[in-house]
Image (spheres, grey):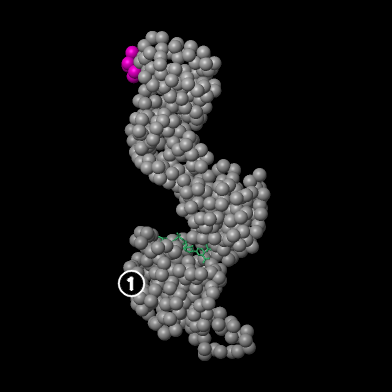
Amino acid sequence: MAKVLVSDSIDPQGVEILRQVAEVDVNTKLTPEELVQVIPQYDALMLRSATRVTKEVIEAGTQLKIIGRAGVGVDNIDVAAATRQGIVVVNSPEGNTIAAAEHALAMMLSLSRYIPDANASVKASKWERNKFMGAEVYKKTLGVIGLGKIGSHVATVARAMGMKLLAYDPFISKERADQMSCTLVDLDYLFSEADYITLHIPKTKETANLINADVLAKMKPTAKIINCARGGIIDENALAEAIKNGQIGGAALDVFSSEPLGESPLRDLGPNVILTPHLGASTAEAQVNVAIDVAEQIRDVLLGLPARSAVNIPGLNPEVMEKLRPYLQLAETLGNLVGQLAGGRIESLNVTLQGDLATNQSQPIVVAAIKGLLSPALRERVNYVNASIEAKERGIRVIETRDTSTHDYSGSLFVQSVGSLGEHSVTGALLEGGEIRITSLDGFPINVPPSNHMLFTLHRDVPGIIGKIGSLLGSFNVNIASMQVGRKIVRGDAVMVLSIDDPLPEGIISEIKKIDGIRDAYTVSL
Ligand code: NAD
Ligand code: MLT
């Protein structure tokens, strides 16, 4: 039975789902060193934000097939290392959207009305009504940086509270921003005009320290910043300094450059600063959502099914995946076939989607062909996650073409390898029931199903040649299951495809090549 390690606390409903298919160990107390030690025995790892899945952990996880992040951000996982090792990384892109958006809104209102400090004051038996004079958010300008899932929900609710909305997100269209009544502006304008600024972006090279001393100097003295996105987007020392000097009005932070927050000047700044311990996703609803979402994906992958929110394989929704599944198998088979026919070093792989197939999402089909091409050499080390990287690292150029003109079958796939020993191509199609047919080989029309062991010859179409091959195979005790010849013209060149029951014995290919009229012969095991 597969084994899953749950290394951060997740909702029990997620653990129950994992238990349907695996033995599950929940251990939320592992040190980084202990994690490296135990990980080799696990097929899957499920975590939240506390566990750091470093390259070292991934390299030690030789059995790992999937890492599931019960949340959005995968910045605590070395995704590049996982991809290289063929490990699927999944997350829950929407499970905690509302929770995080509501936390940002709660932070904004708390900051405007000093709720945390007022509460602490009453609990300390004080009654300081003058000290906590707040401000309304109604008719104030909210600058939303990052108008994705969380930013959009914040904008929608803020709009309903009567706020004016400015937004900065280079990847969002004006139409989308208009739908949320947001005016798309550049960052400098947003910084100088906003009364409240809320961050809903990932931490990337571009966004690290986005809010720094220079930027803080551009803001209104009353401006308040909310960060429920990621630590490190704000320079915390510069922020503390700006609040202390009255350069800006305050800040509410849920996330920090280092968590748990250690020594920090932000702790000493009074009611204008609110700090929460990364609580954005901490609602009962969100934790159930993310646990179920990610556990289901781990269960599916362990059962050999696709994951719906993999961050490191072609993004496909389950319906598209279901529709493409037979074509992925076709692509993998053809890739495998041309890879074996190529024999030597492969320089490029051309994949052409023909007819109706050309209207489909091509990336997964191309990846499947690459996987097939590399699998004879890399075996189970190559999969949908790392196939493209593996091809790139081997200097194999992958060319993808679409040809919508109809061919013999409504949708077919042409795969060609170009390598040190020449070019080989195969075309394949699916019959109505999803059965694979190889419909051409090196340009010769054939119509054969793939079989475990096959022999291909290129020969002169002259009388007697088929018989000679038959007798030779018979003399080596090779049983032929089926045979087909494809030719373009009578007595020209032809190909012969034989399905045989067992792998060809050593040395037989060189014997076949000695037969008069045989130009070449190849054996393939699929
Ligand atoms: P999302 O991917 O839906 O949205 C992110 C948006 O940021 C996208 O629209 C993208 O175009 C935009 N963006 C990317 N780079 C940008 C840049 N340089 N400048 C401006 N915009 C940029 O993600 P989401 O689900 O809305 O999550 C937003 C953030 O919130 C993430 O960092 C996520 O990890 C974090 N998050 C935190 C908590 C928490 O507990 N505090 C909970 C959930 C999510
Ligand atoms: C996330 O990225 O989903 C959040 O950081 C929430 C979390 O997992 O705590």
31 in relation to 327, above or below: below
Q: Residues within 10 Å of mark 1 (few under 14, many from 20)?
A: few
Residues 61 and 49: in front is 61
> At 48% from the left edge and 35% from the top edge, which residue is drawn?
376
Tell me where the magenta segment starts and ends, as one range.
488-493
> At 50% from the left edge and 51% from the top edge, which residue is drawn?
82
> At 41% from the left edge and 40% from the top edge, which residue is drawn?
366
Q: Please indicate, yes or no, whether residue 160 appears anywhere in the rendered image.
A: no
- Give the quadrant of the N terminus: top right
Spot occupied by residue 307 in the image (x, y as percentages of width and height): 53, 48
- Magenta region, main secondary structure: loop
Check disc 1 and report the residue beneath it.
Answer: 188
For disc 1, does the CB lie below 8 Å from ligand 1? no
Residue 374 image-quadrant placement: top left
Q: Is residue 243 magenta?
A: no
63 in relation to 508, above or below: below
Q: Is residue 489 magenta?
A: yes
Would residue 110 be found to the left or right of residue 17 on screen?
left
Spot occupied by residue 523 in the image (x, y as percentages of width and height): 46, 25
Q: Secondary structure at mark 1?
A: helix
Q: For the image shown, how many numbered marks are present on the structure?
A: 1
Would residue 234 be found to the left or right of residue 22 on screen?
left
Q: Please indicate, yes or no, whether residue 124 appears anywhere in the rendered image.
A: yes
523 in relation to 135, above or below: above
Give the amino acid at mark 1. Answer: Asp
44 in relation to 357, above or below: below
Which residue is the extreme one toward the top? 463
Residues 65 and 487: in front is 65
Spot occupied by residue 275 in the image (x, y as percentages of width and height): 53, 75
Residue 363 image-quadrant placement: top left
